[in-house]
Image (spheres, rainbow, N blue to C red):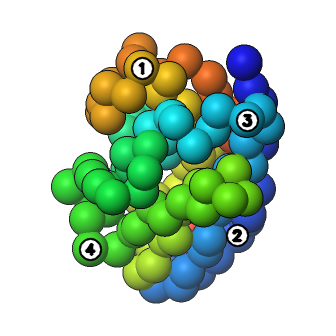
Amino acid sequence: QGQLVESGGGLVQAGGSLRLSCAASGRTFSTYAMGWFRQAPGKEREFVAGITWSGGGAYYADSVKGRFTIPRDNTKSTVYLQMNSLKLEDTAVYYCAADTKDYNSRYVDDYDYWGQGTRVTVSS
């Protein structure tokens, strides 16, 4: 088992950038596919981006494609979410999650471990 800890959230103006980090404990991090999800007030948690265990493949929600990237560094047991050209509608609590079965999924239920979340607020 492992633990995921997100950081890097905050307040940013529309059009700006933020980089979120998700640090994982445990030696098996490098074998897990990872994902970022977000949840806005009054809405369900939604998929944002995912990356394969090796980092060789990444996939994105249409709403963030071309603006967000999800690099990972297995030597540091960390996955990132680089967010550029932020919009008001990107405001949410962002969660990272580990997919231990390597489904490379966009579905919440396919992820086994979750961080506590980090809040991102985009202002006009």
Q: Which mark is residue 101?
A: 1
Mark 3 sits on what residue?
A: 27
Instruction: Give the number of the mark in front: 4 or 3.
Output: 3
Residue 66 bears which disc, if any?
A: 4
Whole-Å distance between the Cαs marked 3 and 2? Answer: 33 Å
Question: Which amino acid does the dot numbered 3 rest on?
Answer: Arg
SS for dot 2: strand
Query: Considering only order in the chain, which callout, 2 or 3, is on the residue closer to the N terminus?
Result: 2
Q: Which residue occupies the foreground of this view, 51 or 43?
A: 51
Which residue is the site of mark 2? 11
From the image, state whether disc 2 or disc 4 is nearer to you.
Answer: 4
The local secondary structure at tag 1 comes to loop
Which-is-in-front pick, marks 1 and 2? 1
What is the spatial separation of the Cα atoms under label 1 and label 2, in whole angstroms? Answer: 34 Å
User: Which mark sits nearer the N-terminus, 1 or 2?
Assistant: 2
Q: Earlier in the sequence, mark 4 or mark 3?
A: 3
Task: Residue at 61%, 55% (x, y): give it.
Answer: 74
Give the percent coordinates (x, y) of residue 39: 51, 37
In screen coordinates, is 12 left or right of 116? left
Cα–Cα gap, marks 4 and 3: 32 Å
Please tell me whether mark 4 sits on a helix, a strand or a loop.
loop
Of the image marks 1 and 3, the number of the one nearer the N terminus = 3
Instruction: Tell me the mark number nearer the camera, choosing from 3 and 2.
Output: 3
